[in-house]
Amino acid sequence: MRCSRTVTPRAGSARNEYDTLLSQVYAARTVGDLAAMTSQLPGGGAALLPVPAGPPKTNSRAVAAMICGVAEFFTLGLTSIPAVILGHTARKEIRQTGEAGDGLAMTGLVLGWVVIGLWLLFWAVLVGMYVAYSHTPPAGG
């Protein structure tokens, strides 16, 4: 046979508990102390944790990718491969860390691939012209 016992709280005990908790809240020195005391509340005291101020940091590799992408036009394409490599690594880091700068990384990627494509087209046309010229018989001969 089970015996269940119900305990009715005394009116003074709830008030004493309230006063004790309130004095602990006033004695808290850090936000972490408050979060520890309010962890039993709905939400677990998460509302007390500090919110990061301002926008997220911009990824430095994304900035470098965009700079290399723009510099391609002044370096005749020498910075196109670094722009593509930096753009890919920056986008991977941005997905992992949540930093800002995805547009910068994409700009570096697009500019890098465009200039690489233009260089490949240039060399294909140049080689094609060389092959066409070298296989034509001399005129008048």
Image: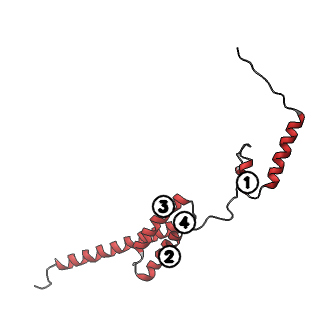
Tag 3: Cα neighbours inside 10 Å, few (<14), some, or many (≥20)? some
Q: Which residue is mark 4?
A: 103
Q: Secondary structure at mark 1?
A: helix
- Identify the residue at image location x=35%, y=75%: 119
Q: Residue at x 62, y 64 (%)?
A: 56
Q: Residue furthest top?
A: 1
Which sits earlier in the primary sequence, circle 1 or circle 4? 1
Marks 4 and 3, how far apart at CA: 13 Å
Real-space Cα separation, disc 1 to disc 2, in angstroms: 46 Å
Name the kind of residue labelled 2 in the image. Answer: Ile
Q: Does the rendering let one see residue 48?
A: no
Specify how the rendered protein is coloured.
secondary structure
Name the N-terminal-most of marks 4 and 3: 3
Say left or right for 106 vs 8: left
Indicate which disc residue 92 carries.
3
Q: Is residue 15 left or right of residue 3?
A: right
Q: Which residue is mark 2?
A: 67
114 left or right, relative to 137? right
Give the residue type at disc 4.
Gly
Q: Is residue 7 above or below residue 20?
A: above
